[in-house]
Structures are given as C-alpha cells and as structure tokens.
Amino acid sequence: MADSKTRILLATILAPILWGTTYVVFTQTLPVEHPLLVGALRALPAGILLMLLGPGLPPRDKLLPLAIIGFANIGLFFGMLFLSASRLPGGLAATLGSMQPLIVAFLAWPLLLRRPGLGQVLAALAGTVGVGLLVIDDTVKLDAIGVAAALVGAASMATGTVLIERWGKVGTPLALAAWQLTLGGLLLLPVALAVEGLPPMPTVRNLVGLSYLVVIGTAFAYWLWVRGIATIGTGVAFLSLLSPLVATFLGAALLNEWFNTQQWLGIAIIFGSTVAGIMLSRRKAGGAPAPVRPQHQSA
C-alpha cells in the first residue's frame, strides 16, 4: 500500500508541472481578451473526452455535490485563473495563486475536521515566500481586478481540493475528473459568452494551443490530480507550488535568461516547503484521507 501511494504521489507531481505551462500557452497562443471563454473551452471538451473513456454521465443523485465541486474547482477557478493571467504579470499571478496550500490547510479544519498543524502553516507560508522570491521583481505593477481574480481563484481551487477529499467517493478518480470538468465548463460557458461574446475565427495557432491545454494540461492532468487527492489527501495541494517554478523556467528559457541568487533561494524554499508540507500533511491525516461523510450530512 505504501509503495502504491508513493507511485501515485510521484505521478501526481506531473499535474502541476503540466499546469506550469498554462501561462505561456495562454499568452502566446490564445486570445487573452477572452479569458473566461478560454477557461470554458479548456474545461468542457476535456470533461467530455474523459467521459468517453468510460464513466458516462454522472448519476442524478450525485449532481449537487458534483456541481459544487465543478463550480469551485473548475468553473470559478478557470475563469479567475485566465482573468488574472490576462491582467497581471505571470510572477504576481503565480505568487497570489501559491497561497492555495495555506487556504487548503485552514479549510480542512471545518470541512474535514482536521486542524492544521503549525508545521503545515509555516510550510505553506514559506512556499508563498519562495514563489515570491522566484518570480517577483521591482517592475511589477498591480491591477486590482487581476489581484482579486488571482486570490478568488486560489481560494476556489483550494475549496475544490478539500471537497474532492470530502465527497470523493461519488465516483472513481477518472469519473470525478470527467464530471467536474464537464459541469464546471457548462457553468462557465454561458457566463463567458454573456460577458465576452464570441471570439474571432480561431487560427491554427489557437487550435494547437487549445488542443494542448484540453488534452494534456486538463484532461490528463486533472485525472492525475483527482487520483492523488483521493489516494493521499489534501496534502497534495503543496505540489501546486511547482507550477510557478515550471512557468518561470519556461519564461527564462524563452528569453534566454538565467536565475540570480534571490531566485535560486526561492527555488530552494519552494522545494523544501513542498516536501515538508506533504510529509506533515500525511502525518496529520494519519497517512490516509479523512473518512467521507454520508451525503445527507455534506451537501
């Protein structure tokens, strides 16, 4: 069992690594003036693709918890993610988003009856500091809407992460990933069309970028992520700190730049807080996710 969990943990690491490519793909290949629509078109096709692999349609009696998870983890999060990416420098958006492990730790208290330990809180704070050292410089300009979107997005995905552990028995990881992506995309799409309207005719570049996000960065990555939460627990949220690390590496490679001393310190802190946070979270949870409560107590 321990070896199986270790293998799943190692596989789950791939999800935030893939998500780290999202900012570059979005800003370089997709229409940044339609962030909500990009979020919907990323989620909905990915969910349908996963449903075609076996789960089928979600059961009617599970629609409420699935819709809540889909809204928090996909609909609201994707919308806020791309909105913040369209209005903020990648570094600032990443730093605000890196608060997710801290939010998860505190949400697990009322929702999973699991009080965060001091070590978890310190590791989460250290992770945010590490990301800030890595990506923030003195040229960053604040945008109120972008900052608010990034914070709401971090809180939204943190909520979805905790709810997956709480209600995760409604289906297999593949089914849960498929259903939350589909429902989240369906919830976001009409809002996106109402707010942003239809985009211009897509180019080949747009289609290639969106195809990558749908198949690799969403369908595959979210299946890995949901499976990790279902098996290991909410401690996997600390792995999300790896996303801005990957994004920064990609940005440096594209610009042919190298890291300075401050950035290397940030990288070291990110790795240290990620490892410490996961170890402390697993120890706090007794090495297994908290028991799932009956649906009539949760929904």
Image (spheres, rainbow, N blue to C red):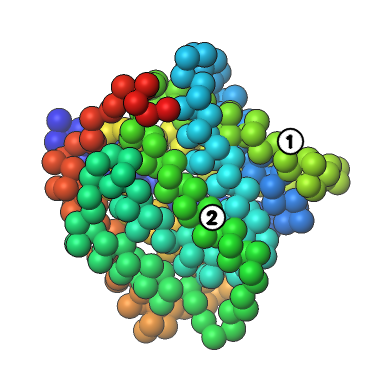
Crowd class of label 2 (few under 14; some 14 to 19; many from 20; radius 10 Å): many
On the rendered image, what quadrant is the N terminus found in? top left
Dot 2 amino acid type: Val
Name the residue nearer the viewer: 216 or 81. Answer: 81
According to the picture, the residue beneath numbered tag 1 turns out to be 190
**Residue 178 image offset from top left, x and y in percent:** 51, 27
- Above or below residue 262? Residue 295 is above
Taking 37 as reference, is 45 left or right? left
**Residue 80 image offset from top left, x and y in percent:** 60, 52
The answer to whether residue 246 is visible is no
- Real-space Cα distance between discs 1 and 2? 20 Å
On the rendered image, what quadrant is the C terminus found in? top left
Query: Which residue sits at x=42%, y=83%?
Result: 260
Secondary structure state at the residue bearing disc 2: helix
Taking 20 as reference, is 76 left or right? right
**Residue 94 image offset from top left, x and y in percent:** 50, 64
Query: Which residue sits at x=47%, y=47%?
Result: 157
Name the residue nearer the viewer: 285 or 214. Answer: 285
**Residue 259 image offset from top left, x and y in percent:** 43, 78
According to the picture, the residue beneath numbered tag 2 turns out to be 152
Query: Which residue sits at x=39%, y=46%?
Result: 14
Name the residue nearer the viewer: 102 or 14. Answer: 102
Q: Which residue lies furthest to the front in this view?
A: 297
Crowd class of label 1 (few under 14; some 14 to 19; many from 20; radius 10 Å): some
- Above or below residue 224? Residue 182 is above
